[in-house]
Amino acid sequence: MIKVSIIGSGNVASHLINAFENSIEIELVQVFSRNIKVLEGIVSSDKITDNISSLKDADLYIISVSDSAIAKVSQQLLFSGRLVVHTAGSLSADVLDGKNRSGIFYPLQTFSKNRVVDFAAIPICIEAVNPEDHRTLEMVAKAISNSVFTIGANQRKALHVAAVFVNNFTNHLYGIAAGICENNDVPFNILKPLIRETAEKVMAISPKEAQTGPALRGDEIILQSHLDFLTDQNTNNIYKILTQSIQHDAKL
Amino acid sequence: MIKVSIIGSGNVASHLINAFENSIEIELVQVFSRNIKVLEGIVSSDKITDNISSLKDADLYIISVSDSAIAKVSQQLLFSGRLVVHTAGSLSADVLDGKNRSGIFYPLQTFSKNRVVDFAAIPICIEAVNPEDHRTLEMVAKAISNSVFTIGANQRKALHVAAVFVNNFTNHLYGIAAGICENNDVPFNILKPLIRETAEKVMAISPKEAQTGPALRGDEIILQSHLDFLTDQNTNNIYKILTQSIQHDAKL
C-alpha cells in the first residue's frame, strides 16, 4: 500500500480523502488542517492533526490548500527529501519549497462539499521531475481514477485556461440565462434539459459540429430582435461579442 | 386519438414524427415535405406527401420548417379555419396566415438528426388564443412530454434568448476550449467530465451558488497569467469581458 498524507481540508482535499479512504491500494496516513473541525465525519479522528510538525512518514504528501497558501505551507514542512505535490492547475511545481522532491497531482473537476462525485471518472493530471516519483504519482492516481494523464507545465496551463471557459464562464452564461428567466417570470427549470443536452452533445461530436443558432445562420432579424430585447448593457455586450466570435469562427 | 399532421422534415420535425409515432394518444395523419426522400425510414411511405394541396383533415397541423419559411408555408395551405401552429421559439403566432386558427408548439431543446432524445423530458411551450385550441395543444404536448408549459409571446422570447446563452454561446465556449486544447496538444477529452459536471451542478443548485474560479475570487495573478497565455485577440477579449461580467455580478 502506498502511504499518502493530505495537507488541507477544502473541497478538493475532502474529495481526495474520501477517494483514498475507499481505495484498497492507498493507506491514508494523516490529514493536516489548521481547522480540524471541518474534517470531523470525513476522516477518522486518529488521522487528523493540526500540528504540522507532527506529520508522520509517508510516500506522498499532497498539499491541497488555496493557491496563494501553497508556497508557504510547503516551507513550513519540517522534513526534507520526500515527495510533496500540490493540486493546483494554475501553478508550477516550482512554487513548492526545494527541500522536498516536487510534483503535481491535479484533478480536473469542479468540486462542491455537498456533491458526491465519482472519482473514477475524474481526469488526474500528474507531473514529476524524477521518474520514480512519476511512477508513485501514477500509482496513486490510478488507484482512484481511470483517467490519468502525464501533463507538462505548459499543457496544464492550457488545460486550466480551457477549464475556465467550460466551467467558470459557462456557469456564468447559465447565470445570465437564469437572470433573463427571473426578470420575465419564466422558470429556469425549463432550460435544464437544454443545458444538459448541450453538454452531452459534445461528448459525442465536436463543439464545431454541434454549433447551431441564429449567429451561425447569420439570421440578422433574430439577432437584432434579441439585442433589442436585452436592455441590460452588460448582457447585451456579451451577446454581441459572442455572436461576432461565432461568426468569426464560421469563416475560418 | 388526436389527429396531427406535420409540415416539414428537418431536425425538429423528424424528432416530433418519431415521438408521435410512439404515442398511443396521437394519430400521425401525414407528413408533408418538398423533399420526401429525407422522410424515408422515418415515417411509413403512405403518410408522406410532397403535394401541399393533398393534405387530409387533421385536428392540428404543425409547421416545422426554417423560421423564414413559416409565413409562406402557412399561406400555401389551401384549407381554412383549422388549427395551425409553428415550432419556432423566436416568432410570434402572428406570422401564420390568418385564414387558420394559430398557435405555438415550441419544444425547447437542441435536436440533431443522429441523436436519440427522450421527448418525455423535453419542455414543450404552448400558446393559443382560443381556449379549445389551447386544450388540444396541451393534450398533444402531454402525449409526448411530461413537461408542458403555457408560455406567452414575451415569455417565449425571453426563453429563446436565454436558450441562446445556455446552448449556442455555451457550445461556442466549449469550442474555444477545444481550440486551446488543440493548439497545445492536450486531448479535449480531459475536459469532458468537467463539462458534464458543470451542467449537472445547476440541476441542483443555482448558477450563482455554483460560480467559482479566479474571476469570482478576484485572483489577479491567475487572471493576468491567463490573459498573457491567450494570444488570440478574440479569445483574449472574451476572457476579459466574461471575467468583468462575473465580477460585476458578484458586486450586486
Image (spheres, coloured by chain):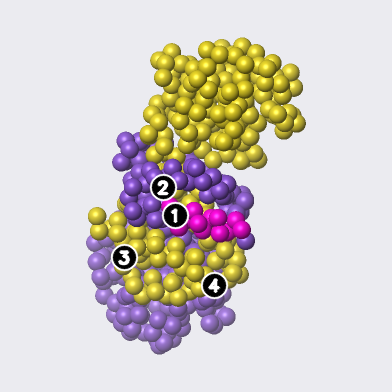
Chain colours: A yellow, B purple
Disc 3 residue type?
Arg
Q: Nearer the viewer, residue A66 or B221?
A: B221
Is B30 rendered above or below residue A135?
Answer: below
Residue at 41% across, 37% down: A157
Disc 4 residue type?
Gln
- Dot 4, crowdedness within 10 Å: few (<14), some or many (≥20)? some
Task: Kindly indicate whether the residues beneath marks 1 and 2 are on one polypeptide chain.
Answer: yes
Query: Closer to the N terminus: mark 1 or mark 4?
Result: 4
Residue position for label 2: B227
Task: Kindly indicate whether the residues beneath marks 2 and 3 are on one polypeptide chain.
Answer: no
Q: What's the CA distance linking mark 1 and mark 4?
A: 31 Å
Residue at 55% across, 29% down: A71
Give the percent coordinates (x, y) of residue B158: 51, 70
Q: Are marks 3 and 4 in contact (CB under 8 Å)?
A: no
Indicate whether residue B248 is drawn in magenta: yes
Q: Nearer the viewer, mark 4 or mark 2?
A: 2
Give the percent coordinates (x, y) of residue A132: 43, 13
Residue position for label 1: B240
Disc 2 residue type?
Leu
Give the percent coordinates (x, y) of residue A212: 36, 59
In the drawing, what numbered circle is on residue B155?
Answer: 4
Chain at numbered mark 4: B
Q: Nearer the viewer, residue A169 or A120?
A: A169
Q: What's the CA distance linking mark 1 and mark 2?
A: 8 Å
Q: What's the CA distance linking mark 4 and mark 2?
A: 37 Å
